[in-house]
Image (tube, rainbow, N blue to C red):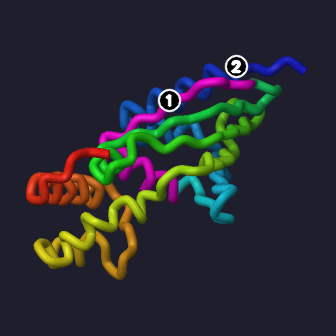
Amino acid sequence: MKLSFNPKDQLDAYVQTVNAHHLDQALALLAEDFRIQFIDYGSSMTKEEVRTALEWDAGTNGHISYEDLEVDGRRVSGMFTEVNDFLTLVGIKALKSRNTYVFDKQGLIREQLYERLPNQRSFQEAMQPAVEWAEQHRGDELAEIYPGNRMIYSREMAQRWVRLLREWRQDTGTSKG
């Protein structure tokens, strides 16, 4: 059966809007019942929850790229690399993952399967020295952006984290990754 759309072109459009931080345009390329499944964590996110993740990415100057794409009907799989200021500042050059996107008949992304590649440092582990510094030097700020040791995913919180991490690096003379 011939598709009325090109899955790779649809994925390219999505990646371009995500990288340009055009949230509404990116979300318009997702089906209403979209879900992202995090294979390693046994969790998932809905389309509305993805909005907060994209806001975080915008606040951290996030960028994704891919290689080794394979197209099989309405499924596109490949190796993805994510970079952003938060990761860089905690010493992680990039997060690598295998992603599979499944498109509906209209060419919207219905499902994303996300599988982190093994042997990568977790950002929680990498940010621990900064958290310890902030507990001593910026306790009030840390309490607001990391309440109960939980990340709050929004553009504002991402920007505040980036500022705090830059201050930590400058104060401690810590070099990047």
Mark 1 neighbour class, 10 Å CA radius: few under 14, some 14 to 19, many 20 or more: some
Residue 2 rendering spot, x and y as whole percentages:
85, 18
Where the N terminus falls, by quadrant? Answer: top right
Q: Give whichever of 130, 175 is nearer the camera.
A: 175
State whether residue 84 is above or below residue 39. above
| Nearest-to-viewer mark from 2 and 1 | 1
Cα distance between the residues tagged 2 and 1: 19 Å
Left or right of 167? Residue 176 is: right
Residue 54 sits inside the magenta stretch: yes
Q: Is residue 112 left or right of residue 3?
A: left
Q: Going 36% across and 52% down the picture, which residue do you hit?
A: 56
Q: State the SS at label 1.
A: strand
Q: Estimate the x, y position of residue 123 in percent, counting from the top left.
A: 42, 58
Please name the amino acid that badge 2 sits on. Asn
* Residue 53, horizontal then vertical, whole percent: 44, 53
Q: Which mark is residue 65?
A: 1
Q: Which stretch appears magenta? A: 49-70
Q: Which residue is mark 2?
A: 6
